[in-house]
Amino acid sequence: MYIGSRDYGVCCLEATEGTKIWNFVTGANFDSSPAVVNGLVYAASDAGNIYCLDALNGNPIWDISVGVSINSPMNFADGRLYVVSTEGDLYCLDGSNGEKLWNFSTGGIVHTPSVADGCVFTGSYDGNLYCLNASSGAKIWQNLAGVFSSVSISGSAGSPTIAKRVVYVVGNGVLSAWSSPSSDDLTFPLFELILVAILAIIATVTIVYLYFKRK
């Protein structure tokens, strides 16, 4: 088990007996749950630092500061780490080196995101459910799923869950479902691109043929 704690550290415990295997200590609290992927432990402190640790011994591999408090669980998908801050920002980091790829800001604190079909979904204290492009962070759509509050979680759009391309979220005590775009919706389909190229070639050949025939 990997646990973030308020005694300024992340610790690894043997799951059966609870024996401490290692402890990584810094000068900040770790209120959010670590993410464990492919032998790596990702943990974020309330001082705004994000750490990548070796799961076997706790040795640091890299760390990065985003400058704002992190107190919500992270999500790891497709080699990217998604972290939310108390300032209303969603950060996307490269899981291999911590490089910041993009960040997206809302009008309120952001909940832990979910990732599917090339999209990132997150709810916010501003009452909206957001759908973002996972590669660029560009907003695809936003829908009101709760009520605005800059400080209260009670009416906000919560952390979404995705199943069979449907996004489920609770906002202001109401469960709602939204359709998720497919990856085909995010890029120009290859088939259509080839078809357009073929038609352009045919049109060009036809124009050239008619031109020389008239001569």
Image: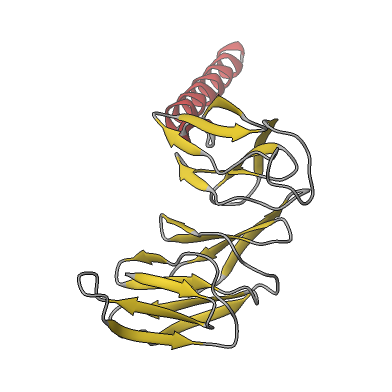
Image coords of residue 188 (percent x, y): 52, 33
Q: Judge left or right: residue 117 versus residue 66.
A: left
> Residue at coordinates 39% horizontally, 79% vertically from top-left?
11
Counting labels gives: 0
In the rendered image of this protein, does residue 130 appear above or below residue 69?
Answer: above
> Which of the colour schemes (rainbow, by chain, secondary structure, one colour) is used?
secondary structure
Image coords of residue 76 (percent x, y): 44, 58
Nearer the observer, 62 or 29 = 29
Extreme-left residue of the structure = 16
Nearer the observer, 113 or 203 = 113
Task: For the C terminus, give its image quadrant.
Answer: top right
Task: For the N terminus, give its image quadrant.
Answer: bottom left
> Residue at coordinates 64% horizontally, 74% vertically from top-left?
48
In the rendered image of this protein, does residue 158 appear above or below residue 146?
Answer: below
Image coords of residue 120 (percent x, y): 54, 45
Extreme-front residue of the structure = 17
Q: Judge left or right: residue 100 versus residue 162.
A: right
> Residue at coordinates 60% horizontally, 41% vertically from top-left?
158
> Residue at coordinates 74% horizontally, 48% vertically from top-left?
152
Which corner quadrant of the image does residue 52 belong to? bottom left
Which corner quadrant of the image does residue 88 belong to? bottom right
Image coords of residue 165 (percent x, y): 44, 29
